[in-house]
Image (cartoon, coloured by chain):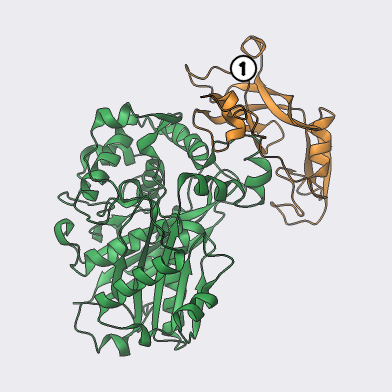
Amino acid sequence: MGRVFEGVRIVGAGQTTYAKRSSDTVQKLLYDAGSAALRDAGLDWSRVDGLALTSFMLPPDNSATVAEHFGIEARFLYQGLYGGASGIIGMAHAARAIRDGACDVVIVAAADAFDVASHNETLDRFNGSVREFMSPQGFGGANGMFALHTRLYMERYGATRQDFGRFCIALRANALLNPNALFKVPLTMPDYLDAKQIADPLRLYDCVMPCIGGDAIVLASERVARELSGPTLRILASEEIHNFPANDVYSVPGGWEGFADRLYARAGCRPADLHFAQLYDDYPVMCFVQLEGLGICGKGTAHRFVQSTDITTRGTFPVNTGGGQLSAGQAGAAGGMIGVYEGVAQLMGRAGARQVKCKRGVVSGYGMVAYGRGLSSSAAVLERVD
Amino acid sequence: MTNPTAGAVPKPQPRVTQLTKPFWEGANERRLMIQRCARPECGKAVFYPRVCCPFCQGAELNWFEASGKGQIISYTTVRRTHHDGFNAEAPYVFAAVALEEGPCVYAQIPGAPTDGPSLVGKAVTVDYVVHGPGRSMPVFRLTGPAGQA
């Protein structure tokens, strides 16, 4: 079977510093992340003819007005509407557009400038079902929503707070090697277990820190990629699924198992062939669900997986090597690109002190929290071309 | 210094639309109104209010009064609220409740213990509290002695 994204390469990745406070606008963050990714690739903005952007704070502006703002004549635009699943979905749309000859160089970027108040405000009126049938009822925001999933996971499979703690502590260790990460001090198990209570069983370090930042990658046609001196990557496969399973919020807490078989069949590899996972870590429980849904460990065994596997950059199966949203920060919709940025930087060998030995890895996205769950799941397998 | 307006922050109110009106009017009459697919071969109960059946995509849904009985799928004790309108009542128990008829409804469980043994699977019965001017909100109480405490 031919490659799904034949003729398309990932050629660069860029990330802004993640900050708690900044006067930067979303346009500035998208520009900075995009510029960093282009520098990484050895291209400049004059070559860009497509944008795939995701940002909660971009409206009333949109991808077309960003093209105008930056002075780009765009032959392809995408604007992500699926929260943290949008980065990977945008990457796949852009790759199809390049494959089909619509455009040559696409910046796939996400950025936001959130604080806790604006994060809560956004979520409060995120969509109709949340606005009418969760928020007025006092759902406690995303923390409350995912507290329900966390409790259910713990009761179903016997996972403990310590298991989630191990995961969060490992991500913090990874973040300490990422100069762009918000958190700069190690996390200990007592810190984790005794942190401020938020929504039982969740405490402070189960929850992401809303912040300001952006991430970008550059996709290019093979024709353009041939001009470049740096390493390039292939997208072996990319999948998305929404509202899976329909009408069933709690039996399968995430859509990944709805496409994992197809993802690996198209990628031509197995989970055992992956060298890392960059998961959407809005809450540690969702990472457990992704490890299982993506076939990296068996269903209901992620807590045992993190007991027996070192997931730091020094470990046998590194996860969220830049610290993820939990320890680098959640810059709104950039949460859906931070793992893509990190995966690309790793595969290109440009991850500095946190570099892991890798040729192939999985990146995963999740978003659009609605009536009790995130509706949208996405994942892609990326591989360096040697 | 205390802020005289703290605690006076209104809770987020639903926007009552033509679609959701039967639910909110029902709540004001202490009736838990939900929808059911009109196609006999489907007939599934539906919540939140929809324009079509999410099981069979049938166009016709009929409103009916649910039993108000259900059980807790999962829950949390909200200690840090998402909206200042709930600050005065935190910590409180917030749950996903599976109605006897099938659908999942999100609601607070007033009077439920905020700490202690798990409430997952516990039986609950609907009740109503004042949510804002002219607006009742369905909540659930633990069925039996614990709920009457």
Left/right of residue B131 with respect to residue A344 in the rendered view: right
Q: Which residue is mark 1?
A: B111
Which color has been applied to chain A in this rendered view?
A: green
Residue A289 place in picture, x, y as percent:
40, 45
Residue B139 place in picture, x, y as percent:
68, 27
Residue A98 place in picture, x, y as percent:
42, 83
Q: Residues within 10 Å of mark 1 (few under 14, many from 20)?
A: some
Figure quadrant of residue B10: top right
Q: Quadrant where the C terminus of chain A lies?
A: bottom left
Figure quadrant of residue A229: bottom left
**Which residue does the image show at 66% across and 39% down from the upper left?**
B12
Under tag 1, what secondary structure?
A: loop
Q: Which chain is orange?
A: B
Image vertical order of residue B7 relative to residue A264, above or below:
above
Residue B114 place in picture, x, y as percent:
52, 20
**Which residue does the image show at 51% across and 42% down from the upper left?**
A142
Left/right of residue A365 with respect to residue B28 in the rendered view: left
Note whether residue A377 is visible.
Answer: no
Figure quadrant of residue A359: bottom left
Image vertical order of residue A2 relative to residue A263, above or below:
below
Note whether residue B5 is visible.
Answer: yes
Mark 1 belongs to chain = B
Q: Amino acid at mark 1?
A: Gly
